[in-house]
Image: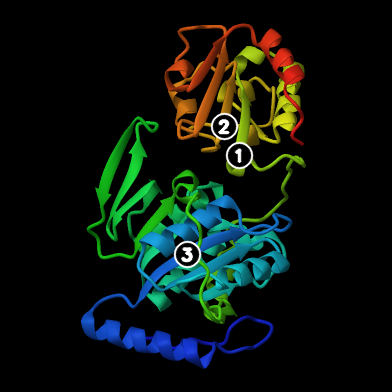
Amino acid sequence: GKELTKVGSSGGEMWSRTLLKSLRGARQSSQQSGERSLGTLCIVEAKDGAGGLDSASKATLACAQKHLPKPFVALVASDAKGASEAAAGEIASLAGVETVLHGVSDKEGANGLLAEPLSQVVAALVGKLEPTHVVTGSNTFGKNLLPRVAALLDSAPITDVVQVVDESTFVRPIYAGNALSTVKFVGKGPLLLSVRTTAFGSEALETAQGAGAEVASVGAEEVAAGAAAEALSEWVGEEKSESERPQLDAARVVVSGGRALKSKENFEMLEKLADQLGGALGASRAAVDAGMCSNDLQVGQTGKVVAPELYLAIGISGAIQHLAGMKDSKTIVAINKDPEAPIFKVADYGLVGDLFKIIPELAEKLPSQK
């Protein structure tokens, strides 16, 4: 196998001798047995200003730590050097982590999150480290990255995993979550999978006893492989709404509105209710398509998948596409004027009535939790 080379384009540092020896020894052993040498490669996202690992990254690490072959190496992709280093330091303290790699691009900014160059970096790392499994989150970042990596490695990915049966058998939802399919991987590998935040996000991460894992920059060869693909895409910018509310996919309480709210002005009632409950704001696709709110609030099959402790569905009929994104919530409360609305079939509590009378009354009686 190839020996590990100098890391990073700036420091000229070398991989630690301990890491080099352990990987070389594992690789030599695997070559003799014909098996891959490393357990799992985790790919996580770290965004500047996010305040630590997001829920998808934590779920990815929890799945690798509790259910996949060890040891595992974590690769941190980020849009800022500071966020990348902070996330790498946090991951290094976890049990089962052998190495944490960061610095996937030699350019500052969001180039480190672009799927085209990042997929080349991941493919090069897989060729060098020879992991049996590669795992990432089933969020926008993972859905953009994993198919490209799969194409480069000529290996079929298993997506939206909600349960790990064993190292090659997984459970994933199909038909908008109305059925669960058990899938067994029979290829030569590596096995590529993405995991749902709602399935593994509640599992606590275990901290390592003693010294943490090695933290190093991605090797020069891998950075060069990514740089060669940078011409395929360009980061233009990002527009996002700033809010003091918790992130939708990580909130304990979610207040969602649907088509019945009729206008953007009426949707503001839910904003006040969400603030009172200290929760996040969500919406159905119909509300988003009608221009009542931004599409980053959409919950459902083509939006975000959430599983809060409390989910309030207000003026939402309960289409199958919406249920796919919220039916794992611990407690579901539905408010709708139609007693036959499908949302009541999954709701723990239902209130039939005019939401324009119920919501102001509810807001008046609820104390502010903000």
Q: Amino acid at mark 3?
A: Cys
Neighbours of disc 3 within 10 Å: few (<14), some (14-19), many (20+): many
Residue 347 appears at what percent x and percent y?
A: 48, 22
Q: Residue at x 67, y 11 (%)?
A: 358
Neighbours of disc 1 within 10 Å: few (<14), some (14-19), many (20+): many
Compare residues 208 and 99 and report the one nearer the observer: 208
Between the residue at mark 1 and the residue at mark 2, the CA separation in whole angstroms equals 7 Å
Q: Is residue 152 visible?
A: no
Q: Residue at x 44, y 88 (%)?
A: 3
N-terminal label among 2 and 3: 3
Between the residue at mark 2 and the residue at mark 3, the CA separation in whole angstroms equals 30 Å
Q: Are marks 1 and 2 in contact (CB under 8 Å)?
A: yes
| Depicted 59 relative to depicted 91: above or below | above
Q: Amino acid at mark 2?
A: Leu
Q: Which residue is mark 3?
A: 42
Q: Residue at x 39, y 31 (%)?
A: 176
Residue 370 appears at what percent x and percent y?
A: 77, 36
Q: Is residue 217 visible?
A: yes
Quarter of the image containing the N terminus? bottom left
Mark 1 secondary-structure assignment: loop
Q: Which residue is mark 1?
A: 252
Q: Which residue is mark 2?
A: 310
N-terminal label among 3 and 1: 3
N-terminal label among 1 and 2: 1
Residue 360 appears at what percent x and percent y?
A: 74, 14
Q: Amino acid at mark 1?
A: Arg
